[in-house]
Image: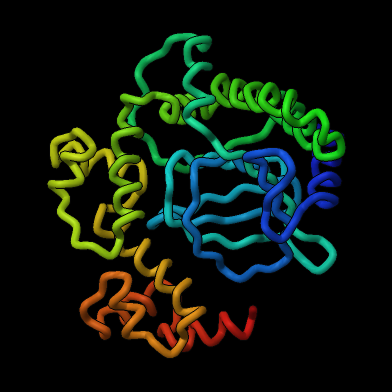
Amino acid sequence: MQTLLDEIRERISAHARPDLGSAVPGLLLSKVDQVEPEYALSEPLLIVMAQGGKRLLLGDRAYEYRAGQCLLVTADLPVTGHYVDVAPGRPALSLGLVLRAAVIAPLLLEAAAGRRPRPEAAIATCEAGPDLLDPVARMLRLLDRPQDVRVLAPLIEREILWRLLTGPLGGRVRQIGLADGELAHVTKAIRWIREHYAEPMRVEDLARLAGLSVSAFHRHFRAVTTLSPLQFQKRIRLQEARSLLLARPGDVAGVGHLVGYDSPSQFTREYRRLFGAPPGQDAARLRADA
């Protein structure tokens, strides 16, 4: 296992780009040596940590994973994270694989039938054993053999997903591939909030969109995201506002209105609570860092 980790570490370090992309579709590479908190919208991903570590916060829950461990994210979530055990000359190295329901669903036909998975938190961690690290290393080798990517990358992706389905996180991966599962219903509401975050929101309408009763929707939404729908919308609004403020640092009230706040004072208060500084001050710091 250590030999595999060493190879993965070397290949990530050699091929990582600032935009996180790579020549293999859906494969992301990260090389980071900063420890400032990151506020991001995560998509369904498998992340394997090869060096250093990272701690994520979702609502009031914390998740930490280090070299030799992996993180599974099964829904679009607003997360706060920061890297640990990093230093100049020793960056955090990790890779991500976008999890696609269209690829997972056919594998469910081959997997042993089991009980229908109940909604679970959309983030989980576990050890990345050699059965998983081996195809991950082979996927990275394709970066040096681009002529093989079109044929071999889909096969290796299926192998990685199969290892996940038959491993300790299999129930969560299964949820992604079930078109009629509870996660799929909640995901419809999550996507609506992400696309219409600045608009007024009625939980009754979201429950109808998800095909659930209001009480079941509340229960399943919190089970997946650890947040209420209102808290989720607020987190999306504030993260979008932070991005907008980089381009419009002097227009705090205007940015607040754009993301759905009618009250500038409420916007400033909630922004400070999440990011630790008022909007104008935080934007100025971010621009200086950039």
Residue 70 position by quadrant: top right
Q: Position of residue 42 (x, y in %)?
A: 49, 51
Would residue 47 appear left or right of 206 to someone viewing this image? right
Whether residue 238 is visible = yes
x 53%, y 87%: residue:
284
Left or right of residue 140, residue 25 in this image: left
**Residue drawn 31% across and 52% down?**
227
Number of numbered discs present? 0
Residue 255 versus residue 73 in the image, above or below? below
Identify the residue at image location x=54%, y=35%.
Answer: 99
Picture coordinates of residue 231 (x, y %)? 29, 59
- Which residue is pictured at 72% across the width and 46% down the height? 22
Task: Mark yes or no: residue 70 visible.
Answer: no
Asked which quadrant contains residue 165, the reply is top right
Q: Position of residue 263 (x, y in %)?
A: 22, 81
Q: How is the image coloured?
A: rainbow
On screen, residue 57 versus residue 263, left or right, reads right
Q: Nearer the viewer, residue 136 or 24?
A: 24
Residue in the foreground of this view, choosing between 245 and 221: 245
Quadrant holding the N terminus: top right
- Quarter of the rendering containing residue 81: bottom right
217 up-or-down from 110: above or below: below
Q: Position of residue 13 (x, y in %)?
A: 82, 52
Above or below 177: residue 243: below
- Which part of the image, by quadrant, shows the C terminus? bottom right
